[in-house]
Image: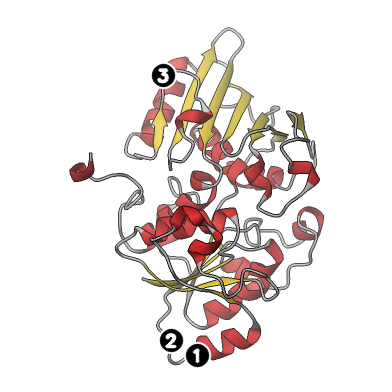
Amino acid sequence: MNVIVIGASGYVGAELIGLLIQHDKISIQHLLVSENSDASGKTFAELHARWQGLCTLPLQAFSAQWFEQQINIDNHDIDAVFFATPHDFSAQWAQAFIDADIKVFDLSGGFRLKDAEQYPIHYGFEHQSLEALQLAQYGLAEWQANEIASSDLIAVPGCYPTASLLALKPITTNNLHVENSLIVVNGISGVSGAGRKASLATSFYEVSLTPYNILQHRHQPEISQEANAEVIFNPHLAPYKRGLLVTITLQLKAGVSAEQVDAAFTQAYQNKPLVRLVTAWPKIDNVAYTPFADLHWQVDENKQVVVVSCAIDNLLKGAASQAIQCANICLDLPSQYSLLPTASTL
């Protein structure tokens, strides 16, 4: 698969490129940044020193002119594009790539919500690519592999929704919860979730553990949409670099046992190597810099309540490595391909 990456200067773009470099079935053809970016003309390794000696590709400025020159609909060798861009940018450009027979993996929120009317509310722009929006497939790799494989536009889930949905879906898809009952998702994430652009709000000197965007975070409708259940989402910002943890509380139907809940999680993830069902409450340190999601739960049968926690790396399982999982699925490879060490390297 020959690919390009748009948004190579940001944290997620850098993580994605680092994973693509080590993938032996994918070849990066172009790395692009925004048209006015001061990173244009530099090499990827100049901007992200962690990858010195591994990637010397130049960062090019994306523009309509670049697209016309490089993506000739009748004569190009690009199979896929990864967007690690602002949400409105991917919403604007995805259809042009689809029309050029280029598969789109969108790591932004430009196509995660199916209802176009929700974008002005939660993302601040009117969605103009309604045809592409209708085609878009949500890309939760462990749950939607068949749909991902056949789609031309994959909306890679957000970081909070990834952890939340991995924790919720074994319960909600098996109808073990009380319908229309209160589902509370409490989340905490490091400052890298806010992106690379400098901001006083994410300065380490300013950051303290604090809730934000309560009852209005853009990930709330995404979680509700894909869990097929309304949730209350309470995100928190914490003073550390990376990693994310959610803890979810929901009411079980009368008579649902701990054994039934255990069976639901085991059945969902027994053949999913990137989801680890751990025997103690998960820790962010155990998943940071990895593609894993760690899950643990506890049932109170007297109160008919289950509490589930999931920890992930927000830049990897919550973004870049899940995009690689989606690409692997489209290549008919195991979703974890290239993300885990092989037996020969252990």
What residue is pinned by disc 2? Answer: 76
Residue at x 45%, y 18% (from the top left corner): 280
Q: Up-down: is 140 above or below 72?
A: above
Q: How many marks?
A: 3
SS for callout 1: loop
Q: Up-down: is 3 above or below 51?
A: below
SS for callout 3: loop
Query: For mark 2, does the 10 Å Cα neighbourhood hold few (<14), some (14 to 19), or many (20 or more) residues?
Result: few
Q: Identify the image quadrant of residue 162.
A: top right
Distance from label 3 to label 1 (Cα)?
53 Å
Q: Up-down: is 23 above or below 218?
A: below
What residue is pinned by disc 1? Answer: 72
Distance from label 2 to label 1 (Cα)?
6 Å
Amino acid under label 3?
Thr
Tag of residue 241:
none
What residue is pinned by disc 3? Answer: 279
Q: Identify the image quadrant of residue 302.
A: top right
Amino acid under label 2?
His
Residue at x 48%, y 62% (from the top left corner): 45
Dots 2 and 1: beta carbons under 8 Å?
yes
